[in-house]
Image (cartoon, rainbow, N blue to C red):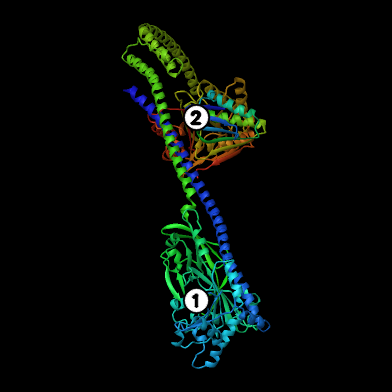
Amino acid sequence: MARSSLRTKLVLVAGVSVAAGLLLSGGAAYLGLQSLGRDAGEETRKGLRYATQEYLQKHIGNVAQRLSIEVSRAEGELATIAAISQAFVDNREELQPVFDAAAKAPMLADQLVYHPEGDWAQNGPDEPATVTAWGYLLTDPGVDEEDAGKDAGKDAGKDSGDADSDGDEGAQPARAVREDVAQAIDDTALMDLLMPPIHRHGSRKLQIYYVGPTERPFARFFPSKQLAQTLDAEAPGHNEAMFWDFFFPGLVDGWKKWIGQSARFISPLGQITLTPPYYDAAGGGPVVTLFQPLWSAERDHFEGALGFDLSLKGVIDYVEEVKLFGSGFAFLAQDNGNVFAVNEAGRERLGLTSVAASGGGVDIFEQSLGKSSEQAMRELVLPTGDKPVFVEVKLGGRDHVVALQRLDPFNAWGGDDEIRESHWVVGFVVPDEEIYAALTAAEKAVAMSSQEVLALQVGITLATLAVVLLWLILVSRRLTASLVTLSKGAARIANKDYAVTVPTDASDGDEIGALTQAFNQMASEIREHTENLEGLVQSRTAELEEANREIVGLNERLKEENLRMGAELDVARRLQMMVLPATAELDAVKDLDIAGFMQAADEVGGDYYDVLQGNRALKLAIGDVTGHGLESGVLMLMVQTAVRTLLTSDVRDPRRFLSLVNQVICDNLARTGVDRTLTLSLLDYVDGALVLAGQHEEVLIARVSGVIERVDTMDLGLPIGIDRDIEDFIELKEIPLAIGDVVALYTDGITEAETPEGELYGIERLCACLERARELDADGIRDALIADVMNHIGEGKILDDITTVILKRIA
Amino acid sequence: MEVRDSTYRVWFDESSSTVFFEGSLRLGTADYRPISELLDAVLAKNLPVLTLHMLELNFLNSSGINTLYKFAISLRKRGSTLVTVRGTTVIAWQTKSLANLKKFLPTITIEMLSDE
């Protein structure tokens, strides 16, 4: 039980420690790897975003440039032919012979034939260019027969002579081209030489044409085709309305606003005006028309305009074919948000719907961003500067980057008489996920490798744990086996089987080996002790007997010592009592009633008092020698002898008297090497006055009046036997005594008498007792005092000698 | 340096140059010798200043007082040590006996704390 629990604990503790360590380090590594991946991902994302933006910026710049070039090429060509035509106008008079000659040249001569079914005149289809004069440019045959017949008949008559032999002529009267119109047609015949090469080379133009000024807007149109017939079908009513007003309302008025602006006329290129893109009525696909107006030599009159119908197919194809990342695409829009070039997928992505709109004479196709089903597109703001703009938008719920770049500016006609500067805008749309495709792949790889690291970590943890546990189990088996053996041995000892030896071979070197050895040694000692117990008891008993004998011997010696000490104390006590004044001596004193008392303590102190009749005065003394025993007693005897000797020698000065006592004692103590001192007060009584000298306890005086006076003696001297010269410190105190006054002298045996509890008797009790007893005679006062002190001590021990002397003046 | 018994303890503290007396001293005359020796050893150091700290000495019998007086006389003979005694009026014997020290050693300073 104990074995398995100890082992389990060992294995558990170590196993948990190892597992915790491994798991913590593994967790830290895994978290570190994840955070590294996250940081790297963020960095890469930033880098990718930057690189993508850089790439898109360059790419969109190139595309914009390419598109601008496509348009500006056509503008250059238009400017060229317009410049020549303007030269014709400017130099009409000088070139008139050339125009006339050209008009007569068979290759350039235009033979217009009146078409009654359409009511217009047009030249034949084999001419280089189609020239058409609308019905309102023809003469009315009934009104102005002569004029019209002459002019139109000259040209048309010839033609009708060739072509109109089918007999239609008779049904409808033929109408002739107005004179001024015919002249203008002749004057522009040379254009037939210019239009074909310009059309053939350079940009993709569907048509080149010239339309005359508002007062004679005939059309010269290349390549030749049945213009009037086509327009009759596509634009009914055109033959009755002025050409410019019908097809391009407001355009000419817009141009006329430039008259007087000299800057406009420095470079004719600055006058080129574009229509919105539209589908060609004759099925030529998406086109945009470029116009360049011509002006009179004075630049104050509109002289018609040259126009190109530029095919947008190339531009649109180019835009639609731009590929960005996976599904990114480009689009081209007018600056009003109308998208006119975008591929099918892009159109869907931008949420555009195509609405056919009719404006004037041309169909304008409209798919405006403003009407997109995508909120982001509806709110998209097109750039107003030349720098590319990047916008983050949500399309179809996914994040996209949109790049926008404005193309070169041009004059735009929008259907009224305002000609504005306008731009086309090219846009790139790229899904974020395609930009970050590489990053996403990298993050997946990081996540995968994190998983692998985690798996590896778990594997390592489990393997390490397994190895550690196996090792622990093996080691703990060996350890606990030794302990189990030991505990079995201990159990046997507990059962008083001391014949135990635990084998130590298994674990010699370690602490358990040492423990086993110690155990064996202890077991063997216990065995030895148990076996020898009897012998041990015998030897111990013998030792005890020996000790007992010694103690008995010591006790005997102690008794002897005690006897000796007792004898010493006895001597001391007898000395002390011997020198005390006898009652007879006290009674012999006149005027004073005197009572003395002394009780030695168990250990004899050194109290002393004396009453001696000198020649002049009565000498009283009271003192207390330090310490106890014989030496104190002897010192007391010396003091008594010295006092008596000095009194006998009649030394009258109390200061000198005390000083001499001190010197004698000092000298004697020095000789005998006794380490004692004493306090001593000496009093002289003569004629009703006491003179007090020497330091001792306070002197108490109970006056007849009932007042208790306490006279302190501290300043009256010094302890005796310490310092040889004390005379300077001795002071005298005179105390007058009235008859009935009581003086009490005492030693500290009274004031320091203790109750069994250690409470001191004290001077207050002494005073109180004196006050109570002061009317008694000296013996009575003494007895009352001693009784009070003894009562105070009670069962307690008398620690020090108790001494008192009571004086009462009786005469 | 220290002398002690169950009821008292006397020791010299070098850092504060003070002899501390503590407890109750009721020894016989001869038994004061170890304390005298301690005081003599302090005397031998010839210290510039010395404090005798008695605030915790509740009782000193006449033999002990005698020992103090003699120490005071020894100090006077050396003459170079400024001695301060700290006592208290709360303890009866001190009021009575410490004043005598001034007589044996006039340069001594006696500081008596009252119980306030």
Between A207 and A435, the residue placed more toward the observer is A207
User: Is residue B49 in view?
Assistant: yes
Label 2 sits on a secondary structure element that is: strand
Residue A101 vertical placement versus B93 (above, below): below
Residue A163, horizontal then vertical, whole percent = 50, 80
- The verdict on a common chain for dots 2 and 1 is no
Return the mark for residue B8. Answer: 2
Q: Is residue A330 left or right of residue A532?
A: right
Image spot of residue A629 (x, y percent):
50, 22
Residues marked 2 and 1 touching at CB (< 8 Å): no
Chain for disc number 2? B
Q: Using the image as rendered, state which of residue A74 and residue A43 is in the foreground.
A: A74
Badge 1, how many Cα within 10 Å: few under 14, some, many 20+?
some
Number of the label disc, if any, that sits on residue A59: none
Amino acid of disc 2: Tyr
Residue A360 in view here: no
Q: Looking at the picture, does residue A504 appear above or below residue A787?
A: above
Q: Is residue A448 left or right of residue A269?
A: left
**Disc 1 marks which residue?**
A227
Mark 2 residue crowding within 10 angstroms, few (<14) / some (14–19) / many (20+): some
Q: State which chain disc 1 sits on.
A: A
Residue A681 spot, x, y in % from top left: 55, 33
Q: How many marks?
A: 2
Is A600 on the left-hand or right-hand side of B11? left
Q: Quadrant of the N terminus of chain A?
A: top left
Q: Nearer the viewer, residue A430 or A155?
A: A155
